[in-house]
Amino acid sequence: MSAYDANNVFAKILRGEIPCNTLLETEHALAFHDIAPVAPTHVLVIPKGAYVNAADFYARASEAEIIGYARAITAALKALGLSDGFRLISNNGASAGQSVFHFHTHILAGRPMHALLAKE
Ligand code: AMP
């Protein structure tokens, strides 16, 4: 895994250097709408700490950060009115589809989502 790059786009959002469409902010996390949604609801939840991906976050983050992050996802789901019919996705590494190297979870909802992955 590469080192954390403080110039990634989500780090810039956290520093207020570029705007985002915020859903909610907590002590440990920020939730905002994806700039290129692939479903009617497409929200990203990011921790405020500098973590490359899920593997990095769950290995290094404090218990308060991990619990705070989980609670922020719960709060985002509540704010979106979602109790089911949604998908949570975190891509880890470029080969898994990760394009922004600051840990994030996608919340996707509002259209049918059947198989997890298309068969190759
Ligand atoms: P991933 O490919 O899993 O790393 O997801 C990165 C996501 O970030 C993509 O769905 C992008 O559309 C989204 N994204 C990139 N730049 C921005 C931005 N400035 N504001 C909101 N979402 C963004």
Image (spheres, helix red, strand yellow):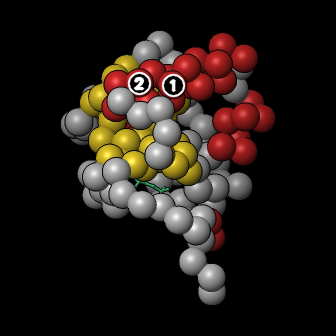
Instruction: Determine which residue is flagged by label 1.
Output: 74
Q: Are marks 2 and 1 in contact (CB under 8 Å)?
A: yes
In the drawing, does residue 19 fall left or right of residue 27? left
Q: Which mark is residue 42?
A: none
Q: Is residue 14 above or below residue 75?
A: below
In the rendered image, residue 107, in percent from the top left (x then y), is placed at 45, 44
Q: Is residue 97 left or right of residue 43?
A: right
**x, y (%) of residue 15?**
34, 28
How many other residues sit within 10 Å of disc 2, few (<14), some (14-19) or many (≥20)? few
User: Dot 1, how many residues are within 10 Å of its Cα: few (below 14), some (14-19), or many (20+)?
Assistant: some
Q: Residue at x 30, y 29 (%)?
A: 23
Q: Amino acid at mark 2?
A: Lys
Residue 68 is situated, as x and y percent measured from the top left of the image, at 58, 18
Q: Is residue 30 above or below residue 117?
A: above
Inter-mark Cα distance, 2 to 1: 6 Å
- Furthest-right residue in this view: 59
Residue 96, compared with residue 13, is above or below; it is: below
> Quadrant location of residue 118?
bottom right
Q: How many marks?
A: 2
Relative height, residue 71 to residue 114 (above, below):
above
Question: Helix, strand, or loop for circle 2?
Answer: helix
Q: Residue at x 59, y 25 (%)?
A: 70
What residue type is disc 1 on?
Thr
Residue visible at 72% across and 17% down in the picture? 63
**Label 1 CB-ligand 1 distance < 8 A:** no
Q: Quadrant of residue 52?
A: top right
| Image quarter hosting the C terminus | bottom right
Q: Helix, strand, or loop for circle 1? A: helix
> Which residue bears the numbered disc 2?
78
Residue 34 in percent (x, y) is at 32, 48
The residue lying toward the viewer, choosing from 35 and 1, is 35
Residue toward you, 103 or 67: 67
